[in-house]
Each structure stands twice: as structure tokens, then as C-alpha cells.
Image: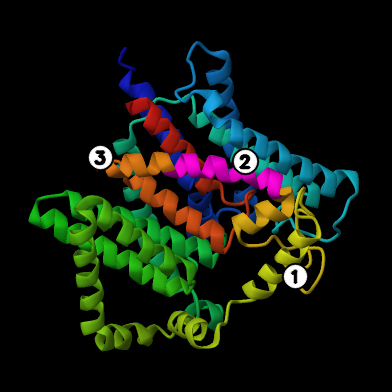
Amino acid sequence: MRLLNPKITHLNSIYVVFLLLGSSVMSFVPTLLKIGNATQWKLISIVSTIGISCVFLINGVLGKRKSVVPIQRLWPLFIFWMFYLFRMYYDLLLIDRYDGDYSLFLPFSTTSYFFIYFIGLCVIPSLSILYLKLDFFYILKLTFWILFFVLILSMLYNAGVKETEFETTVRNKGSEGLSYLAYGHWAVTFSLISFFFFTTTTKAYNKFFFLGGFIFGIIVMYLAGSRSPLFALVLCVMALLLARNGLTKGLFAFAAIVTVFFLFWDTIIGYLSRYNVVFLERIMSSITEGESSGRDEVYIQAILQITRSPIFGDALLLTEGSFYGVYPHNMLLESLMTTGVIGSLFFVIWLFKTCRLAAVITKANTYHIWISILFLQYFIFGMASLAFYTNTTFWYLSFMLWNYYYNES
């Protein structure tokens, strides 16, 4: 195999890190540097992501390089995308089903918002990854250090915010342009990468450093106050331990971690309670009262719409109830609601093939099972909070799995 220029490989890898973190990092510019506002930098991040992705994709398609991944392997996803895009076209352009502002403070119309996000921020960047030779360890290191410094800066920002009682004592989000959920999952991503390094390094001082990073990420997650990041953290840590240590040793290691938390539970809770955030209250209300921030009502309405038209799907968004105009907050429900059983079948086929690749990479116990672990995290994020057109990191990581599998094989 012809070796690629390391500079080109690093450039490609930096581009992928930009896809994973660029938009959120840019959200810190108005917060920390007081340049512009969150909306302006959100627009800059969107335009730059689409523009740079188009350059990489066009260079891959029209250049001499072939796709790292055989394109025909992705046919189920392409068919699902066509179903999904037709649903967007039918609901938003053909019959103009919805009215209201869904632009999330962006200077786009309702229709533009959906198409720009799905095509511009999901489809085009994902396809561009197919043509890249990547240094996955370089991506991992760069992602770790960017998250490390940004989370530290975000903690300083949170400590200095004094404008409202809500921002300082209830939930923290790191910057003006970052949501609580995204901030919490950023922290979990940092914790998982730190824990991955902790399990792979042999030097004592490195283990101490990465263990500190793991705990630091958990603290940030706690301050963000969202519940799905905790669920993702628990499942991903368990998956990582099982992958690296086997079933018996993995379960024993996970049980040991849980035991430590239970032994020091009162001390941990006593310390964290000083920050007066609502994380523990929200977790307990979910367990004891079934409180779900309206998710149950959203799911019920989505299921009603699925039963209304199960074969071809009913609508892009909810069409009735108090959550009118909202997406289902669950990718599988969204798939059934928007494309029906027929379209969802193709999505499930592609998802199964992608999970099989993740399992093969994980079973091989390579140094890059972190891609599979983070893919699992953002799949959980998509099953609890996001939509197909907003869960950009899920798409990027899935295509990174395909890239790694075929590039290394």
C-alpha cells in the first residue's frame, strides 16, 4: 500500500476534529472573548462547516482518490436518506404543513433550517469522510486536549457568571451558545476518552492524570444537570470494560467502580450538594415519579402518528398536542414516524451493519475502540434527545467507523 503524506493525513484528521468539535468550540468565542454574539458565531460555524465539507467532498469525488469505503456498502442508508428527504420536501415545501419559528435563533426560515442542518451539516460532511485517509490516534489526542482546555474555560465561565440565579445555582452550560444537554455530553465524551486512556496506559502518573480527567468530566456532567449523559456514561463505561477485559473481568471491574461510588456516596453527595444544582433531584424524580420532561407525552404522540400511517410514515414533526412542531426525541420513533416501516427497514439494516463493524473493531481490542464507544454514546443521545438532522456527531462517528474498518482491513 502506498503511504500517504503524513501532512495530508494530519490535515484530514484536523478536519474531522473540526467536524466533531468546531461548532461547539466556536460557541465559546462570544462568551470568553466578547466578540459578537452566540447567533453570529453559530452562523459562522454552520457556513464554515458546509463550505469546508464541500471542498473535501468535491476533492474526493472529482480528484484521483477513491473512496476508502466501497460506496455500494452504504446503499441502505442512501435509500433511507431519500425517504427522509422526500418527507422533508413533502411536509415543508409541497404542503407547508407547519407554521412557526423553528430556527433556534438562527437567521434562517423554518424550511431552510431543516434542509441546511440535514444536508449541509449531516449528509455532506459524512460523505466527505469516506474519501479521507485518517490518523485516528491523532484525532483522539487532539479531541482530548481541545475538550480538556475548553471544559476548564467553561468552568471558569460558570464560576464567573452572576447575571441570574438560574445560571449559577441550577444548571450550567459552559457558554451562551451551548445547550445543557450538549454540554453534559461533551463532559461525558471527555470522561470516556480519559477512561480509555486510563485503561491503556501503563505508567502510574499517566493513570493518575487520566483518572483525574475521568472524574473532572463527571463533575462537569453533574453541573450541566442533564440525565441522558449519565445514562450514556454508565453504558459506555460498561461497554469499554467488557471490551478490554472480557465478560468476567469487565463485570468485576464495573462492579468495583460502582462499589466505590456507593461506599463514598454520602461524601460525594455532600460535596456536590454545595453547588445546589438540580441534577440529583432530576435523577430521583425520574426514578420515583417517572418524570421525563415531557418525553412521555412526545413519545405517545409519535406512536399515535406512527399508527396513523405505519407503512410510509405520517409527518416530519408532531402534528398535534402541546408539543406540536417538535421532533420525537428518539431516532427509531422518528424513523417510523417520518418514513414508515419501509424507510425504517433500510435505516435498521444500515444501523445493524454499522453496529456489526463497531463490534468487530471492539472485539479485535484495537487501540481505536474509542470510536465504537463514542458512537454508542451519541446513539444513546439520539435515542433520548436528538433528531436525525441535529445529531451530527452520530453521523460523523458512524462514518468514521466505516472508514476505519475498511482503511485498516
Q: Are marks 2 and 1 in contact (CB under 8 Å)?
A: no
The verdict on residue 97 being magenta is: no
Q: Amino acid type of disc 3?
A: Thr
Asked if residue 37 can be seen in this view, the reply is: no
Extent of the magenta region: 341-355
> Is 177 placed left or right of 407 in the picture?
right
Q: Amino acid type of disc 1?
A: Phe
Residue 252 pos. (x, y %) = 19, 66
Residue 398 pos. (x, y %) = 48, 41
Numbered label attached to residue 346: 2
Mark 1 neighbour density, 10 Å: few (under 14) some (14–19) many (20 or more): some
Query: In front of the other: label 3 or label 2?
Result: 2
Numbered label attached to residue 323: 1
Q: Earlier in the sequence, mark 3 or mark 2?
A: 2
Q: Amino acid type of disc 2?
A: Phe
Q: Which residue is mark 3?
A: 366
> Is 351 placed left or right of 157 in the picture?
right
Q: Residue at x 38, y 56 (%)?
A: 189
Q: Work out whether residue 312 or residue 112 is closer to the camera in this orientation and state it.
A: 312
